Image (tube, grey):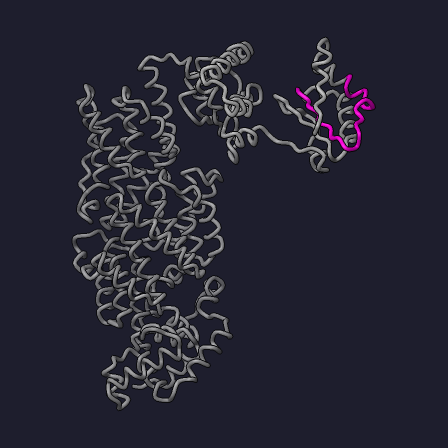
């Protein structure tokens, strides 16, 4: 067992510095038998900054054997090259945050005292006595009242510290000198209290109601500006009922609750404020908050898109004015008036930036970018997004970073840079939680699910969509729910999962999508129609699918939604190709390229429009269109897959079919029904079904739509089909 040599106890007349000096000058006396390990404990390592003493310490470390250990404690990290020893594995250097993290956020001594069953009252008394006698006596350069006020908060940041103006010392200085706070792992600019220290300082808190309200108001305003909703809610709603009638506390608290889907809590706070003595004075502010809440609680599926936002209130609260402007811009965007939405969003963004409402400004900027993208200004939208993302603090837990990183995931994905999109998703996902806005959560879950699905991880992909479905069920989100349903149906289409497709079509009444043309927002109509189009295509009801999508395209073009209109036209072209009318499909896509330009043709369009890659490949091979070099660089592997092994296997399977079976497949691939195949091939309809059963078995398929997709996905087979197809 290691022996502890504590010379300070033997030579009480010496200071710690002198003890170490005397100790290090006599290393010969430290020799031990070979079978015994030596444990040396050194306190106040900073005394070794003296060159002579550092030399002695170095000699001691070099002298010790591999079984010996040195344990060092130091309130302030000594300015000596410990890392040199650590690099030679002679010293293991554990920083305080690591020790505190290992002891559940407490000083290790406190945890040890608890584990040895110290009486809680005695432990508290000893703790308070320590702070009073040691810290207070040595902290004349700080205001204990300021520290008491800061004890209201579980997390401390430089901005919060400076706003309270606690003396001349920084948070870093306080950590280094007093150790009652420690930096969070991975976030050196954020600190947490040692619980016992926070309890002590909080016991000194003597605030009047107005002082407490002022402090909480300042903190709530800061957290709202930066989107730290969890901190805001946990602090302002926890045991703060006496101040929940203060306007500057109610406003950030209710906004945070609404944005994080705590609707009933928000409703309760509003009702309490209305019932208070100050309720009449807060009427205008509370009405705006109630209007905001109604956007998410309206019982009609599409009602949230039509909530009437009142005229701007006469409140002097800047946050309320920002919120009113954002809601008005969002309402106009949802109605389809992109030009007006873009103008109002840009004005609102500038208004928020001037007032340092960083989080709300970020949401508004994303709305500006969405308006540009939907109107077809693809380059400008991408440039704005990239510029805003570069300006963000590179911190995955920062809500503003999360807003713009969600947009960057979509941008990377659309540029076919799936590795970067996935990397960004996986960096952000651990921080995407209940404190994030619904829009951020929806975009991350949707696109991460799609990227996983493209990589073949279908189980994990569906898991994320199911998690998103559960979250959206907590409120009224017709726009996001429609996007989720469209993605679920797209994945079912790709996998030819008819059972899942039937379930989705029935659960979400997709057969009624055509009735939404006037009653629902354009976004809802768009995504629901897309989902219904996938379903009809799986049933080979191509003409119905095309008719539905043509109605949608007209509405999108009328509203100026050029990007979504281009996706819809690509879907129509792909379905037309799969139905057997390849020439019409090719002409349609060529005209779309001429009208919209190549910038609209990205990974999102290709994945959401099954069959369109086949049409585009045909146009390029026949020199009917000439894509720019940058387009081919991004998408050539999609348009011209190089997996010759897969092509060879497909040709081998196809060659195993009999001549009559090959004819049935070719007729099937041109969109013929069983009856039409029977008439053209001169056999009965029951014989056609028998041939199809054999075809499915030989090709390893389960449905006619899977066979059609299989034939069209292999270039050599498509070429044969184009050369020899009947009619």
Q: Residue at x 38, y 30 (%)?
A: 231
Relative image position of residue 158 (x, y in whole percent): 48, 26
Relative image position of residue 214 (x, y in whole percent): 34, 19
Residue 250, magenta (yes or no): no
- Give the mark count: 0
Question: In which quadrant of the rendered image does the C terminus lie?
Answer: bottom left
Determine whether 125 is above or below 718 in the image.
Answer: above
Is 384 or 249 nearer to us in this picture? 249
Question: In which quadrant of the rendered image does the N terminus lie?
Answer: top right
Judged left or right of residue 210, residue 384 is right
Q: Residue at x 37, y 52 (%)?
A: 464
Is 428 or 517 nearer to us in this picture? 428
Determine whether 229 is above or below 600 in the image.
Answer: above
Residue 566 seen in the figure? no
Judged left or right of residue 27, residue 282 is left
Asked where in the image residue 673 lies, by quadrant, the reply is bottom left
Region rendered in magenta? 22-44
Is 288 or 106 nearer to us in this picture? 106
Residue 72 seen in the figure? yes
Determine whether 136 is above or below 294 in the image.
Answer: above
Relative image position of residue 299 (x, y in whole percent): 18, 44
Residue 42, magenta (yes or no): yes
């Amino acid at each position: 067992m290691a022996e502890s040599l504590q010379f300070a106890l033997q030579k009480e007349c010496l200071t710690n510095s002198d003890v170490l000096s005397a100790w290090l000058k006599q290393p010969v006396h430290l020799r031990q038998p070979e079978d015994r390990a030596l444990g040396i404990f050194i306190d106040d390592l900073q005394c070794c900054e003296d060159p002579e003493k550092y030399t002695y310490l170095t000699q001691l470390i070099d002298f010790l054997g591999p079984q010996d250990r040195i344990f060092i404690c130091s309130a302030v990290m000594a300015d000596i090259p410990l890392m040199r020893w650590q690099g030679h594995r002679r010293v293991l250097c554990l920083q305080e945050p690591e020790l505190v993290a290992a002891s559940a956020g407490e000083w290790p001594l406190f945890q040890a005292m608890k584990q040895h069953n110290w009486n809680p009252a005695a432990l508290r008394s000893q703790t308070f006595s320590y702070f009073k006698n040691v810290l207070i006596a040595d902290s004349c350069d700080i205001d204990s009242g300021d520290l008491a006020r800061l004890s209201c908060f579980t997390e401390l940041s430089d901005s919060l510290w400076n706003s309270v103006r606690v003396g001349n010392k920084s948070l870093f200085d306080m950590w280094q000198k007093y150790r009652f706070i420690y930096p969070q792992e991975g976030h050196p600019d954020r600190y947490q209290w040692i619980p016992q220290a926070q309890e002590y300082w909080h016991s000194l808190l003597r605030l009047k109601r107005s002082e407490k309200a002022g402090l909480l108001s300042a903190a709530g305003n800061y957290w709202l500006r930066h989107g730290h909703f969890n901190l805001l809610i946990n602090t302002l709603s926890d045991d703060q009922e006496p101040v929940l009638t203060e306007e500057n506390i109610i406003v950030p608290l209710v906004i945070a609750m609404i944005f994080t889907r705590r609707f009933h809590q928000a409703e309760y706070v509003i009702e309490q404020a209305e019932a208070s003595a100050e309720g009449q004075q807060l009427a205008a502010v509370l009405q705006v908050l109630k209007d905001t809440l109604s956007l998410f609680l309206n019982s009609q599926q599409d009602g949230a898109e039509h909530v009437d936002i009142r005229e701007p209130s006469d409140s002097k609260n800047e946050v309320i004015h920002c919120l009113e402007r954002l809601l008005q811009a969002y309402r106009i965007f949802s109605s389809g008036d992109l030009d007006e939405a873009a103008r109002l969003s840009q004005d609102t963004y500038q208004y928020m930036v001037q007032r340092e409402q960083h989080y709300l400004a970020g949401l508004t900027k994303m709305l500006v970018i969405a308006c540009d993208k939907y109107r077809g200004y693809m380059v400008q939208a991408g440039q704005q997004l990239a510029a805003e993302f570069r300006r963000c603090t590179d911190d995955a837990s920062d809500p503003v970073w999360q807003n713009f990183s969600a947009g960057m995931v979509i941008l990377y994905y659309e540029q076919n840079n799936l590795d970067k999109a996935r990397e960004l998703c996986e960096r952000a996902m651990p921080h995407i939680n209940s404190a994030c806005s619904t829009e951020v959560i929806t975009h991350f879950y949707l696109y991460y699910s799609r990227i996983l699905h493209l990589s073949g991880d279908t189980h994990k992909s569906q898991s994320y969509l199911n998690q998103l479905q559960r979250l959206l069920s907590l409120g009224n989100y017709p726009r996001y729910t429609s996007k989720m349903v469209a993605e679920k149906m797209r994945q079912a289409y790709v996998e030819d999962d008819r059972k899942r497709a039937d379930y989705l079509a029935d659960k979400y009444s997709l057969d009624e999508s055509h009735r939404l043309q006037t009653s629902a927002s354009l976004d809802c109509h768009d995504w629901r129609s897309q989902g219904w189009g996938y379903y009809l295509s799986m049933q080979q009801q191509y003409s119905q699918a095309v008719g539905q999508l043509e109605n949608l395209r007209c509405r999108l073009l009328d509203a100026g939604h050029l990007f979504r209109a281009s996706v819809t036209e690509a879907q129509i072209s792909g379905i037309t190709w799969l139905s057997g009318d390849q020439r019409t499909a090719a002409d349609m896509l060529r005209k779309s390229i001429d009208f919209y330009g190549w910038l609209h043709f990205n990974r999102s369009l290709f994945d959401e429009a099954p069959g369109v890659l086949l049409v585009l490949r045909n146009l390029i091979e026949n020199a009917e269109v000439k894509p720019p070099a940058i387009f081919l660089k991004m998408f050539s592997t999609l348009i011209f897959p190089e997996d010759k092994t897969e092509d060879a296997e497909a040709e081998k399977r196809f060659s195993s079919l009999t001549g009559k079976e090959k004819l049935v497949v070719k007729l099937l691939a041109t969109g013929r029904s069983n009856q039409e195949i029977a008439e053209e091939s001169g056999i009965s309809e029951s014989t056609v079904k028998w041939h199809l059963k054999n075809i499915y078995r030989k090709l390893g398929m389960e449905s006619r739509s899977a066979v059609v997709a299989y034939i069209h996905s292999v270039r050599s087979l498509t070429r044969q089909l184009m050369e020899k197809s009947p009619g």
